[in-house]
Image (cartoon, rainbow, N blue to C red):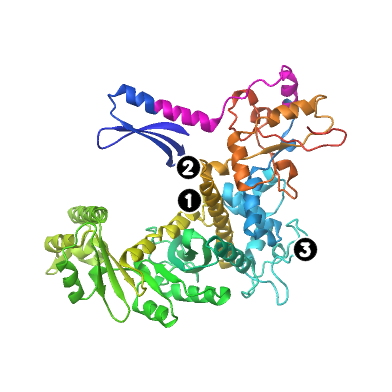
């Protein structure tokens, strides 16, 4: 983290503490206000406040605990990489993994891959290398791939995927032995993961799922050829020439997941919502919640099916796509900022309209930007009759004769009357403001997609076979539920620690033997344990994590291969207390009792 001075359009300068994320973007941790750059007194106060915040987050420097520091240095220098293990990820994410209920899936390979996805996302090759180097757990790449081949399917009739009767080493699990995919059954990992996630989500919303949110996103592949699953279609990432898949996600309030499904990349969005809702409702038996979805799912077929199944719904509307009579009525209202109106439609259906100044500015900006792009393309001579279509702002174009293309400015200016107007179609008995408030909670699912795409690096997907792709998505879905729970706990505790900061709370452990531990090693170890920071201690307490030395069955991360030498990894007198490499807890070894 560091202090940033950000100039504002008003001429002031904001003082912020920012942190670089995994995508190398700068995320604001805390803002301390703004002042005129020539107001030196005010700027100095803001800078002091930001500096104090940084020092508080870092913690005080480690004092000299003992005079015999040469003993400590000798002990540290005597360590090698094989004696240093990091248990932080298992302490934080492993605890949450068990708390949610995934511990019932007795498969260590699945557990290790999910936890690695949370703090070290990457390809399966990178994951295998990381687990071997820092976890001292050895899997071959072929074992990982065979595991993914059957992650979402049962092997044979009467034999469950990942049989719980096998030992928990991960090497002898059923799914790591067979590469032949089988027909989908109702007891695969995906089914069990969804069952556990649904049970926990239901608990989080008070055992009553009264509203659910559905949306889809695209995940593209940097490949040249299509197959049965990876197909070219409309890409929300703008990669229309790349094969892709659709990921549909159904969540409850707060973003708590209910279930998901993947679809071919060329499928229509409107054909995915009803089958998924019916499948999950049939399995979990939940009541009829209000279904909320954006305008991409708005179709007569979907509305008819939702009504037929007895669901209430709130769907995003397209006011400009309504009938001419309805459009004339909307424009006659001359809606201003803050206006909310309702228009009665067929049956119990209502069209709720709201107008805001913020949306008006956004709509105007988008129209101006679209017009500028069209003008630029026309000036370049690349916009011809052969490559023109009616998508986006091409609707402002008109063709005269055989070759002349011009911009219809009358149509462009007429569209300004719609700036700021947003529509919602519903058959609920909620008030107009309640309809808008419920629809605005779609950001829960947008955040879910953002966390999966950026924090968990769901793509790039280094697989081409359908089973492996489904297995990869299942791992990311599991990791998302854990990250969401971590965020919920930190927010509930009103902690200033972010989920990104919590991910960095690694707790090293030292495996000391009789030869490596000095005679007064007990006191040395105790001095090292003083290095536990208030930040880490408070975080682990709020998460309900056990102490590293008391955790049974912990997958400890061990440093090996090309890792840092321990003498470089533990420069106690030169790092702040907040450094994650301070909490050292050596287990007792034969002939020596750890302090």
Pointers 1 and 3 in contact (CB under 8 A)?
no
- The boundaries of the magenta stretch are 47-76
Q: Looking at the image, which residue sits at the far right?
A: 591
- Measured as percent of width and height from the top left, residue 293 is found at 39, 67
Q: Choose the circle earlier in sequence order: 3 or 2.
A: 2
Q: Quadrant of residue 568?
A: top right
Q: Which mark is residue 166?
A: 3
CA gap between label 2 and label 1 equals 9 Å
Split into 4 quadrants, where in the image is the C terminus?
top right
Q: Residue at x 62, y 38 (%)?
A: 537
For mark 1, what is the residue? 454
- Measured as percent of width and height from the top left, residue 461 is found at 52, 57
Pointers 2 and 1 in contact (CB under 8 A)?
yes
* Mark 1 secondary-structure assignment: helix
Left or right of residue 371: residue 294:
right
CA gap between label 3 and label 2 equals 40 Å
Q: Which mark is residue 16?
A: none
* Mark 2 secondary-structure assignment: loop
| Circle 1 crowding by C-alpha within 10 Å: few under 14, some 14–19, many from 20 | some
Q: Looking at the magenta stretch, what is its main secondary structure?
A: helix
- Measured as percent of width and height from the top left, residue 164 is found at 74, 65
* 423 versus 356 height, above or below: below
The foreground one among 424 and 222 is 424
| Circle 2 crowding by C-alpha within 10 Å: few under 14, some 14–19, many from 20 | few
For mark 2, what is the residue? 21
Left or right of residue 515: residue 352:
left
The foreground one among 134 and 103 is 103
Q: Quadrant of residue 7?
A: top left
Q: Residue at x 45, y 54 (%)?
A: 450
* Mark 3 secondary-structure assignment: loop
């Amino acid at each position: 983290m560091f202090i940033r001075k950000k100039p504002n359009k008003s001429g002031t300068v904001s003082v912020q503490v920012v942190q670089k994320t995994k995508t190398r973007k700068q995320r604001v941790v805390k803002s301390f206000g703004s002042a005129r750059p020539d107001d030196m007194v005010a700027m100095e106060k803001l800078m002091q406040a930001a500096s104090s915040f940084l020092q508080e987050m870092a913690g005080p420097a480690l004092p000299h605990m003992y005079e015999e520091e040469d003993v400590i240095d000798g002990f540290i220098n005597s360590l090698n990489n094989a004696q240093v293990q990091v248990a932080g990820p298992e302490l934080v994410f492993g605890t949450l993994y068990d708390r949610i209920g995934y511990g019932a899936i007795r498969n260590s390979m699945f557990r290790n891959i999910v936890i690695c996805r949370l703090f070290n996302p990457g390809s399966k090759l990178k994951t295998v290398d990381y687990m071997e180097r820092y976890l001292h757990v050895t899997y071959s790449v072929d074992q990982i791939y065979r595991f993914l081949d059957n992650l979402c399917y049962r092997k044979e009739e009467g034999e469950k995927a990942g049989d719980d009767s096998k030992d928990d080493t991960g090497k002898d699990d059923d799914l790591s032995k067979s590469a032949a995919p089988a027909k989908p059954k109702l007891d695969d990992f995906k089914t069990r993961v969804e069952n556990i996630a649904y049970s926990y989500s239901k608990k989080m919303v008070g055992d009553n799922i009264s509203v659910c949110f559905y949306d889809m996103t695209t995940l593209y592949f940097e490949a040249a050829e299509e197959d049965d699953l990876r197909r070219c279609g409309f890409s929300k990432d703008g990669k229309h020439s790349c094969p892709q898949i659709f990921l549909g996600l159904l969540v409850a309030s707060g973003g708590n997941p209910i279930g998901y499904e993947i679809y071919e990349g060329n499928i229509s969005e409107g054909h995915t919502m009803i089958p998924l809702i019916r499948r999950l409702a049939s399995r979990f038996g939940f009541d009829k919640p209000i279904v909320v979805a954006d305008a991409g799912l708005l179709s007569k077929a979907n509305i008819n099916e939702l009504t037929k199944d007895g669901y209430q719904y709130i769907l995003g509307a397209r006011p400009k796509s309504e009938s001419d009579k309805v459009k004339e009525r909307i424009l006659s209202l001359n809606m201003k900022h803050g206006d909310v109106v309702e228009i009665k439609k067929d049956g119990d259906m209502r069209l709720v309209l709201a107008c805001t100044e913020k949306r008006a500015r956004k709509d105007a900006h988008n129209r101006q930007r679209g017009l500028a792009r069209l003008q630029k393309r026309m000036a370049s001579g690349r916009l011809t009759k052969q490559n023109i279509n009616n998508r986006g702002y091409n609707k402002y174009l008109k063709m005269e004769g055989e070759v002349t293309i011009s911009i219809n400015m009358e149509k462009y200016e007429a569209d300004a009357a719609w700036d700021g107007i947003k529509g919602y179609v519903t058959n609920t008995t909620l008030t107009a403001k309640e309809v808008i408030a419920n629809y605005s909670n779609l950001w829960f699912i947008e955040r879910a997609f953002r966390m999966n795409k950026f924090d968990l690096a769901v793509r790039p997907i280094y697989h081409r076979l359908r089973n492996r792709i489904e297995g990869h998505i299942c791992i990311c879905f599991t990791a998302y539920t854990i990250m969401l729970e971590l965020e919920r706990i930190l927010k509930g505790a009103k902690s200033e620690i972010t989920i990104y900061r919590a991910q960095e709370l690694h707790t090293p452990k030292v495996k000391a033997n009789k030869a490596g531990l000095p005679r007064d090693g007990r006191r040395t170890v105790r001095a090292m344990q003083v290095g536990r920071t208030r930040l880490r201690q408070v975080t682990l307490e709020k998460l309900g994590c056990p102490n590293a030395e008391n955790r049974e069955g912990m997958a400890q991360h061990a440093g090996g291969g090309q890792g840092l030498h321990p003498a470089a990894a533990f420069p106690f007198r030169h790092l702040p207390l907040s450094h994650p490499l301070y909490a050292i807890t050596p287990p007792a070894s034969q002939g020596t009792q750890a302090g």
